[in-house]
Structure formats: structure tokens, C-alpha cells
Amino acid sequence: MRFRNLEKYQRGKSGNTMELGIPLPQTPDGRVYRYSPNENAHPRHFVLGSRVPEFALPEAMTPRMSHRPGIPETVCPYSGVVAADNDFTHPDDLAAAKKIVEHAAHADMQEAIHGMFEDLGRKLSGSKFIKVKTGGRSAPKPVPRFLRSDLLRELVCDECGRDYGVFAISLFCPDCGAPNIHLHFAREVALVRDQVKLADGLGQDQSELAYRLMGNAHEDVLTAFEATLKTVYLYKVAMRPPESREVKAVGNAFQNIGRGRQRFAEFGFDPYATLSAEALAVLTLNIQKRHVIGHNLGVADAAFAEHAADARLGETVPLVGDDILQFAEIGQMVVNGIDAWLANGSPPPVGNATTNPIVAPRAREPAAVKIGELGPLAIKIGLWIARESTHGYSDFIPEEELLAAFPEASVDEVAFAVAELSTDDFINTTSFIAKRLPRMTSNPSLYITFDPYALKTDPAVDVVTLVDMVLAKKETAQVEELHKETGWPLRRFNPAFAYLISQIDERRVLKGGTNEYPARGFYLVDQDRVELHRFGSRLRR
């Protein structure tokens, strides 16, 4: 008996047993549907194409590859899980394959029986008493298989040249395992560029529509940026031991640079470390601008006015295409750094240059910064001390340098401002009869209060990271070990550490013996743990 329909799928034969192979379902453009075996790798679906013809595959694995391309294994693009190709077949596709085999076998049996009766009919065609009628050779078609209609993000790996598509933010190439988060964000930047070009092409009579398109483009940058950081963070959390995977809900933490830093500090990584001070300032301004556009119909409020000197309360925030593109490019720089971190320090094969030179937004004059009852000159001096500091704790403030920094102020005015800072416990002073100004040294409270304005870093945010690190320790916290664990510069670490030890009973603080830090460390008892836990909870609110 001949099985003509089943033989279409024959891949081999062992004795009388046929070995069948059903082709994987394909998209109209030839990619095959794949489905991650990791049930937590949402949305699990992706499609896999061929290697682009013009791509020259390297002879050996590149430093960014985690998997040799071309072998019969696949990498889940969402979670990095590696398994045999067959493990990535969707259960619905397996069921459809069985239906195809069932249908082919049914058709072969139907054809065989139909043929038997046709032969019998021919043999009995001359009989007057028996008539055989076989009927038509129709058969039901196989059940149509399920096709996804989600919006597909098409990518080509720049390490192995594999063409593939994903239905959400993915982290890895499914062929070679190289991180591809930079490709994903680059596509977002390209779409934003198209939006800006479209808005720029509208006439004056469509200015309202142009502003709306610019606003959407600007918001899309932050949405993609936030989603990218959140995806990478949650992936890193998923890589922890099971008992350490539970974390506080992320919410919109990555719409804030300080809170985003705090999250990634759990892994000893600062996603913004590669940015210059100017680039960080531009990024900060644009994040704030997005909140105004998204939640205040583009009308500047007091919070935004603190970040931009040219912003006026109640007026519409201007949107310029070049500024939006620079915002996207700075976001790409951050994402490229994260991508390199995922690849164990090996950067993606793209540059970090921006189209135009990055110029930090002109901040509001220090007099516009309100800190308690301090006068304008006292605030300027506080900001100057914070910027000039190299250690971030107990810095000596030379009288000559202070006077030289504020030549427009008289000695009496400087003395009054210094007294203000001393009264509010920002500096310590010791008066001398022979000198107009006292001997001055800074207090931790100065950096805790002024650093967010002077350096765009916030010790009140950083200290929460230190609290989490300390609570994970048993009894003693050593300062050098803690500093190394954060990976922060000394200037950033010390204010947060000083803030931390202010919450510990001074009898358990190990003072002296170091010129680099406010203390050598401290001992922890249960009472300290309770106080630190509550302290961290208050700051997180």
C-alpha cells in the first residue's frame, strides 16, 4: 500500500516505519514561530529568520556572544534560557503537526479504500445485478493554525547576522546569545527621528498638531527608556537565588534618576556612570519636561521651573526637534552602557556620539533655590563648598579661597553668610580675635542638603542603598568594604555614609584611624536594625 500524502513529510525510514518531519509554521515572509520554554519569559513568542546573506559570520565566538551561532540550540531572547531547538516549539504547533499527520493518514486510507472500490467497480462493470459507486475524492482540509497579529519588532543581530522578531523588549539574540538591548532602543530612536521629521514638515497653520507630535515623540523616548531599564532590572532580579527575588514593586522608579540608581546599586552598577555632568543635566531636564507634557498639558509648573532657567510658570514648555533627538541619543548612551554590562564589559559595536554638542541647561540662579531661612549669599557659599569638596565630609574651608570665590561681596557680607550657615549647622566655626572670618569646616548636613543642587546626586537617596546593604550584614559594617560594594566615587559615598552613621548610636561607631571616611565602620545590634529599617522606609516614601 502506498502512502502518498504521508510520504510528503517523510524524513527517513527504519524497516517498515516511516520517520516523519512536519515543517515549522512560518510567517508570510518565511520566519518560523518560536515559543520560549521558560514560562516566566513573557510574552514567550518570537519569530526566527535566516542569517542575512551579506553578513560574514566570525570564525570564533566574539566576546559578546554567549552561545555559538548555528548549533541546534536556541536562546530565549527575553530571559536568556538556552534549550534545544525542539523545546521552543509552541504546544499549539505540536498539536497542529499531529493534526496534519492525522489528516494525511486519513487521506491515504480514504484514497486506498476508494481505489479498492474503483477496481472492484471496474471488475463488476458488466454485471447486471451489482453496481459499485465510489463517489468523489474529497477530504476535509487541516484546521488552520493560529497566527499572531501583535506588533512585531524586527531586528538583525550585529554579532551573528541572524534575522528575528520579538513581540516585547528582548535582551538577547536567539542565535548567539549576544545582548541586543542597544538594537531595541536604537529602533525606538529611529522611530522618534521619523516623528520629529514629520512634525517639522508641517506648516504654520498646523502648529498645534506639530506640537502634539513633538510631545508624543518626546514622551516615547522616556517611555522606551524607562521600559528598557525596568526590563533589565527585572531580568537581573530573576537571576538571583529564589529566596532573594522578591523586591518592592518597581512602579515608576525608572522615571527618576536617583531612584533608578538606587535600584541598580543592588547589583553594584550605576547606569548613568558613563554620562558627563552636562549629559546628565540634559537627561534630568527632559525627564522633568516629560512629566509636564504628559500630566500638565505642556504648561510649566514650579517643579519644572526649578530645572530650567528660561521656564515661566503657566506658560507652555517649548519643544524643539533637535532637543528631543539629543534626549534620545543620551538615552541610547545609557542603554549602550547597560548593554555592555550585560555582556560582561564588552561594549556593543556602536558609538556613543550625539548629533550636536551636549550643553547643560542653564540652571536657575542659586538665589532661586530656597533652603530654610538662608539668604542668597549663604546659599551660594553652600553650593560652592559642595562643588569644591573632594571628600564630602569635614572639609576645611580656606578663608582666602572663599573670599576670592565671591569678589562681589564684602568681607562683612561673607561673614554674615558664614554665620547663617553655622547657625543652621551646615558648617562648624571657631572664631579668632585677629581675623574677621572664623576657622570653618563643613558638616555632613551641608552635603546632604546642597548636593542635589550642586552635583545632581542625592545622599538621601543613596543612603537607602547603604541601609539595604548594611541590613544584609551580620554584626559589623566596615567602611572600605561598604564603599567598594557600592562602586561609587569617594565624594558621592561619604555624604551618604555620614548620613547612615548619624542613625547609629555613637557608642557603636568606630571613629578615628582614617582620613578618607567619616568613620571606620560600626557595630550593629537589633535595636540599630530596627532604627535603620524604619529610617530607610521613611526615605522611600
Image (tube, rainbow, N blue to C red):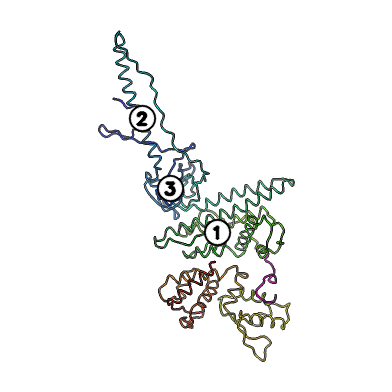
Q: Earlier in the sequence, mark 3 or mark 1?
A: 3
- Crowd band around label 1 with a 10 angstrom C-alpha radius: few (<14), some (14–19), many (20+): few
The amino acid at mark 2 is Ala
User: Residue drawn at (43%, 78%), measured in percent from left and top?
Assistant: 523
| Relative side of 248 to 314, left or right | left
If the image is split into quadrants, where does the C terminus sit?
A: bottom right
Look at the numbered discs 2 and 3 and tell me whether their residues touch, using CB distance below 8 Å.
no
Q: Nearer the viewer, residue 508 or 152?
A: 508
Q: Which residues are magenta?
A: 362-376
Look at the numbered discs 1 and 2 and tell me whether their residues touch, using CB distance below 8 Å.
no
The amino acid at mark 3 is Asp
Q: Nearer the viewer, residue 409 or 110?
A: 110
Secondary structure under the numbered disc 2 in the rendered image: helix
Q: Which residue is mark 2?
A: 104
Mark identifier at residue 175: 3
The amino acid at mark 1 is Asn
Q: Earlier in the sequence, mark 2 or mark 3?
A: 2
Q: Which residue is mark 1?
A: 252
- Crowd band around label 2 with a 10 angstrom C-alpha radius: few (<14), some (14–19), many (20+): many
- Secondary structure mostly seen in the magenta stretch: loop
Instruction: Kindly indicate the quadrant of the structure image that contains residue 312.
Output: bottom right
